[in-house]
Image: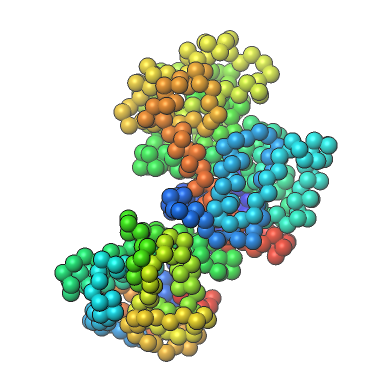
C-alpha cells in the first residue's frame, strides 16, 4: 500500500463533496447561489451572529474549518467589523486528527490551526464551514475545541445545509437549506480558491471522481 | 511512502515534504495544555530496542503517547532476548499481541528490514547498526528548514565519523532527495568504501569547507564501533576535525551547528560551540517528537489495524 496514493492529490483533494476544484463539465451542474447571493447570504449571517451575541464582540471568536470554512470565517469577520466598527477575532481549526474516518479514507495532509493568542476560554465560538452534510466534521471540530480550551458557548454557521445528517447536530446560522439526494454533489466556490463565488449542485460524477460517501 | 519506514531512500520528495509539513502542524500540540490527540486511539506501538538509546526511545514513546496509541517499550536487557531468544521469535510474539507498529533499534544493520518480513504491522527503523536512521534525518531536515527557511540549495557539511554513522547515511539520502548540497568531511580512514557513489561531495579539509557552509552537522566519534585505530590520537582528531570557537567563527553569519547526540564534548565539538546560539542541538530533540508523531500518523492512521491488515501488500 502506497502512502502517496492515499494523499490528497491536486486533482482530488479531500473531502470529495466540497473541497474539490471543479474540473469536469460544469454544464451538468446548476448554480444554486451566484456571486451576488453568496455576498447577501453572508451579510445576513453576519447580522444574525451580531444579533445573537448582542454585539459582544470582545467575547466572539469565528473559527473556520479548513479549507473554505476559513475563508468564510474571514469574510464574516470582516462583515461584522464593518457593521459594528470594531474588529472580531478570526481563526482556523483543523479537525483532521479528530476525524473518525481516517482509517476508511486514508491519511491526508494537515491544515493550519490558528487560534487567538489569548485562547478561547469563556468565549462564544462560532464554527464556520462551507457545507453541512453528515455532521461528522462538526463532531470532530467539537472534540478538537475541547482540547484547546473551554468556550462558554459554541455555535455553528454554514453556507449550505444539504441534509443527510448522521449525528444529532444542527447549524445555528444557515446560508441556504438545500434539499439534495445522496447521489448529488454540492460544490462551494469562493474567489479565494476558485474563479468566482457560487454554490453548485450537480450529479455525482461532476467535477471529478465519484465521492465515496458523506464527508462534510 | 511504503507501509514501513526502513530507509531515508524509501521517501520520495513529496513524501518527505509531507512528513515535514505534517510535523510543522503537529508541533503546535506540544505547546498546548492538553498535549494529546485522539488519532491513534486503540493502536499499539511497540518500541523494540536492542541497543541503548535515550533520545530516540523517549522521543518515539512521547510521540506515540501524544497520538493516544498504547505504547509498549521493550529493551533487550530485561527481556527474553537476554535468555537467547531470536529476533524471529520476538517478532512472532509481537505479531501475536497485535502490534500495529514496531519501532526497532538494533545493533545489526538490516535487522528492521528483516523484521518487516515477519510482522504485519508497520516497521519503523529507529537506527540499525551503521546503516540508517531515517527519522533522525527527517528531524534534521525539519530543523534545517525551520532555522534557515529552506532546503533547496542549502549547503550542508556532515563532519566526522561517516564510516560508522547511520545518521550520515540517512541524511545524505534524504537531503539529496530534498535538493540540498551535502559535503562529507572526514579523515580518509573514516569514509566508507563506495562513498563516491553517494549523492554527496567529500573532503578531508574541514577549514576549507566551513566558509562555504550553511549547516554544519558534527557526528559523534563512535568508539564502541571502532575495533581498529582510525586516527593517531583523539587529540589529533579534535585538532583537525573538531568544531571549536575559532572554526565556528569561519562559518557564514547565518550558519547553524547541529549534532545528533550524544555528544563527546571536547572531542568532535567544543562545549562553547555546543552551547552557543548557533547550536540547534536542543531544537533537534524537541523537533524529533513532532517528526515522529508525523511519521506514526502517516504510517498508521490511514491504514487498517493489525487485525484487519492481514495479507496487505508490502
Quadrant of the image occupied by residue B297 = bottom right
| Quadrant including the C terminus of chain B | bottom right
Instruction: Please name the residue shown 39% across and 72% down the image.
Output: A154
Which one is in front, B243 or A87?
A: A87
Residue A172, quarter of picture: bottom left
Query: Foreground: B104 or A64?
Result: A64
Residue that lies at the very extreme toward the left in this rendered image: A85
Q: Position of residue A35 (x, y in %)?
A: 25, 79
Tell me how many marks there are: 0
Answer whether residue A216 is visible to the viewer in this image. Answer: yes
Relative side of A74 to A156, left or right? left
**Which residue is at 40% across, 42% downward?**
B145
The answer, for residue A209, to whether it is visible in the render is no
**A32 or A147: nearer the eye?**
A147
Q: Position of residue B281 (x, y in %)?
A: 46, 33
Q: Residue A39: percent from the left, percent from the top?
A: 24, 78
* Residue B286 versus residue B234 in the image, above or below: below
Amino acid at each position: 500500500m502506497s502512502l502517496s496514493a492515499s494523499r490528497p492529490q491536486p486533482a482530488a483533494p479531500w473531502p470529495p463533496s466540497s473541497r474539490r476544484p471543479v474540473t469536469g463539465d460544469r454544464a451538468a451542474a446548476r448554480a444554486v447561489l451566484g456571486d451576488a447571493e453568496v455576498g447577501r447570504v453572508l451579510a445576513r449571517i453576519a447580522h444574525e451572529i451580531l444579533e445573537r451575541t448582542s454585539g459582544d464582540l470582545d467575547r466572539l471568536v469565528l473559527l473556520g474549518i479548513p479549507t473554505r470554512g476559513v475563508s468564510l470565517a474571514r469574510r464574516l469577520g470582516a462583515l461584522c467589523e464593518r457593521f459594528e466598527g470594531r474588529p472580531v477575532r478570526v481563526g482556523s481549526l483543523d479537525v483532521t486528527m479528530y476525524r473518525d474516518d481516517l482509517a476508511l479514507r486514508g491519511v491526508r495532509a494537515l491544515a493550519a490551526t490558528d487560534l487567538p493568542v489569548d485562547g478561547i476560554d469563556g468565549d462564544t465560538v462560532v464554527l464556520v464551514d462551507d457545507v453541512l452534510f453528515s455532521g461528522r466534521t462538526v463532531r470532530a471540530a467539537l472534540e478538537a475545541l475541547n482540547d484547546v480550551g473551554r468556550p462558554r458557548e459554541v455555535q455553528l454557521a454554514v453556507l449550505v445545509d444539504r441534509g443527510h445528517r448522521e449525528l444529532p447536530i444542527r447549524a445555528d446560522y444557515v446560508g441556504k437549506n438545500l434539499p439534495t439526494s445522496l447521489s448529488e454533489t454540492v460544490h462551494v466556490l469562493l474567489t479565494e480558491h476558485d474563479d468566482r463565488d457560487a454554490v453548485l449542485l450537480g450529479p455525482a460524477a461532476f467535477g471529478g471522481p465519484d465521492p465515496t460517501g458523506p464527508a462534510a | 511512502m511504503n507501509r514501513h519506514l526502513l530507509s531515508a531512500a524509501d521517501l520520495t520528495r513529496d513524501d518527505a515534504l509531507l512528513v515535514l509539513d505534517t510535523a510543522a502542524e503537529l508541533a503546535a500540540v506540544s505547546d498546548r495544555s492538553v498535549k494529546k490527540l485522539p488519532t491513534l486511539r486503540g493502536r499499539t506501538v511497540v518500541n523494540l530496542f536492542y541497543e541503548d538509546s535515550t533520545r530516540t526511545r523517549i522521543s518515539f514513546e512521547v510521540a506515540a503517547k501524544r497520538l493516544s496509541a498504547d505504547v509498549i517499550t521493550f529493551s533487550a536487557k530485561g527481556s527474553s532476548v537476554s535468555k537467547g531468544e531470536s529476533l524471529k521469535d520476538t517478532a512472532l510474539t509481537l505479531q501475536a499481541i497485535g502490534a500495529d507498529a514496531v519501532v526497532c533499534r538494533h545493533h545489526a544493520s538490516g535487522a528492521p528490514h528483516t523484521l518487516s518480513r515477519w510482522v504485519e504491522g508497520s516497521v519503523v527503523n529507529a537506527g540499525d547498526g551503521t546503516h540508517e536512521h531515517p527519522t533522525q534525518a527527517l528531524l534534521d531536515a525539519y530543523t534545517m528548514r525551520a532555522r534557515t527557511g529552506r532546503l533547496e540549495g542549502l549547503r550542508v557539511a556532515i563532519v566526522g565519523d561517516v564510516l560508522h554513522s547511520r545518521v550520515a547515511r540517512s541524511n545524505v539520502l534524504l537531503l539529496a532527495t530534498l535538493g540540498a548540497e551535502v559535503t562529507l568531511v572526514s579523515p580518509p580512514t573514516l569514509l566508507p568504501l563506495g562513498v563516491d557513489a553517494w549523492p554527496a561531495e567529500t573532503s578531508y579539509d574541514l577549514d576549507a569547507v566551513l566558509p562555504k557552509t550553511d549547516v554544519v552537522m558534527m557526528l559523534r566519534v563512535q568508539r564502541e564501533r571502532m575495533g581498529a585505530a582510525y586516527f593517531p590520537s583523539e587529540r589529533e582528531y579534535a585538532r583537525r576535525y573538531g568544531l571549536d570557537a575559532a572554526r565556528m567563527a569561519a562559518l557564514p553569519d547565518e550558519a547553524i551547528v547541529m549534532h545528533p547526540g550524544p555528544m563527546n564534548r571536547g572531542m568532535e565539538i567544543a562545549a562553547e560551540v555546543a552551547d552557543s546560539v548557533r547550536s540547534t542541538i536542543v531544537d533537534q530533540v524537541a523537533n524529533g517528537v513532532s517528526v515522529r508523531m508525523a511519521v506514526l500518523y502517516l504510517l498508521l492512521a490511514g491504514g487498517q489495524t493489525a487485525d484487519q491488515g492481514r495479507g496487505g501488500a508490502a
